[in-house]
Amino acid sequence: MVKVGIIGCGNIARFHYEGYEKAGAQITHVCDIRQEAATALAQRYGAKASTDYRAVLADPNVDLVSILTFGSTHLEIGLAAVAAGKAVVCEKTLTDGPAASATLARAAAQARTFFATGYMKRYFPAAQQAKKLLAGMGPLVSIHARTWQPFPGLFEQPLPEWEWLRQRPSPVIRNYGGGVLVCGGSHILDLLHWFAGRPLRVSGQMRFRPELDFDIQANALLAYENDAVAHLECCWHSLRFAGYERKGWDERLEINTTDGRLDFYTVKWDEPEKNGALLVHQDAVTGTTTEYRYPAVNPFHLEMAEMLRRYEAGEAPEPSAWDGYVVDETIAAITTSAREKRTVEMCWQDR
Ligand SMILES: NC(=O)c1ccc[n+]([C@@H]2O[C@H](COP(=O)([O-])OP(=O)(O)OC[C@H]3O[C@@H](n4cnc5c(N)ncnc54)[C@H](O)[C@@H]3O)[C@@H](O)[C@H]2O)c1
């Protein structure tokens, strides 16, 4: 039985510990700088509680840790976990920038540490099926990828009187390191990387407001080999009924190849038990259209089960630390392109 340590007991933690619990792992040590958060979770599992992550890493009763703290802390905690010989599942984004992510991925590779980045959307059954189908659909032509997430108020004139909006740095920057591109776009960039490979160059445009310190809209054109292209749209919008679930969550990828089209619709990330993700396959060769409707499953739970399976089987994790680095490098390129109003040629630090 794999023994798991949880570092960071905030919003995302329940998706990890419930996933590990369902998959038969044992939570043996939990940590948060907020003592009460660590103690409450420790009681649930009869686990140890700490306020210093180093206690978890020094615990011989821990094989694998989930790092669920803010992105700005992932480099320090991740390097310490690698040095301590623990396997790691690190929430996205891998760190707060590509240089730090490359450092972390390199350290994990050199130490041969099992080190995963938590982009769980790959684990929707619809995403897995899309990946399988794509392998037989001929060369990629284009992808239109959208993550429009409901966040009413941010386009209002004037802005709502929320005190947190005026804090500097705002909690969005302090906790996540960026606005909609980092928070929502990162997941889509991971899916684009998984489906299409690494882009050759990117052109980005981002919307900021002078009263805010984070982006509320980000668009990019990503160019791939053989003239394939992806268009990415991210927005924190006010459309209450948009999207496949008609509740404002509007996230989808339309993937076009020479032999057909896949339409993949995700469901709201923190309510995955309400609806299943949807995949529609139009086969241009046979003329048939197939809808794949899946039961509502939590992709985090499937992710944790697969992480444990791979760890125990001695297989590499997916997505890996290097996959996390690719997303962070692409985010940085889109941001530079938008700021400097030029196309950015991608330059990968692991090649
Ligand atoms: N996969 C997803 O869809 C998804 C969704 C939300 C958040 N996330 C990611 O999860 C991570 C955490 O986000 P969250 O929303 O849970 O934030 P949160 O603020 O709710 O929780 C973070 C927790 O970490 C604790 N913490 C901070 N520094 C610490 C340290 N040095 N040692 C121990 N504990 C520490 C905080 O006290 C807090 O309880 C971020 O990297 C975020 O990007 C991923």
Image (spheres, grey):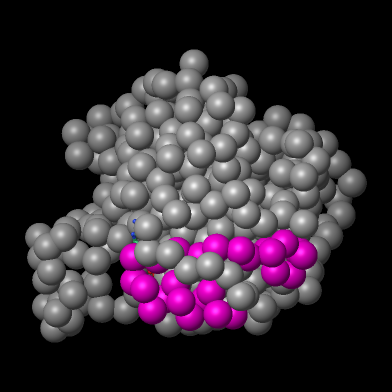
Taking depth in this image into account, of 26 and 332 the one nearest to the observer is 26
Res 319 quadrant in image:
top right
Q: Is residue 350 visible?
A: yes
Q: Is residue 127 visible?
A: no
Q: Position of residue 340 (x, y in %)?
A: 19, 34
Taking depth in this image into account, of 127 and 220 the one nearest to the observer is 127
With respect to residue 33, does 338 lie above or below?
A: above
Residue 28 within the magenta-colored segment of the rendering: yes
Q: Which corner quadrant holds the N terminus?
A: bottom right
Q: Position of residue 241 (x, y in %)?
A: 48, 82
Q: Quadrant of ligand 1?
A: bottom left
The residue at 44%/22% (across/down) is 348
Left or right of 181? Residue 288 is: right
With respect to residue 115, does 198 lie above or below?
A: above
Q: Which residues are magenta?
A: 20-44
Taking depth in this image into account, of 49 and 291 the one nearest to the observer is 49
The residue at 27%/63% (across/down) is 172
With respect to residue 39, does 336 lie above or below?
A: above
Left or right of 203? Residue 288 is: right
The residue at 62%/38% (across/down) is 114
Q: Position of residue 270 (x, y in %)?
A: 54, 73
Q: Position of residue 325 (x, y in %)?
A: 46, 35
In the picture as drawn, the residue positioned furthest to the right comes out as 286
Residue 53 within the magenta-colored segment of the rendering: no
The residue at 76%/64% (across/down) is 23
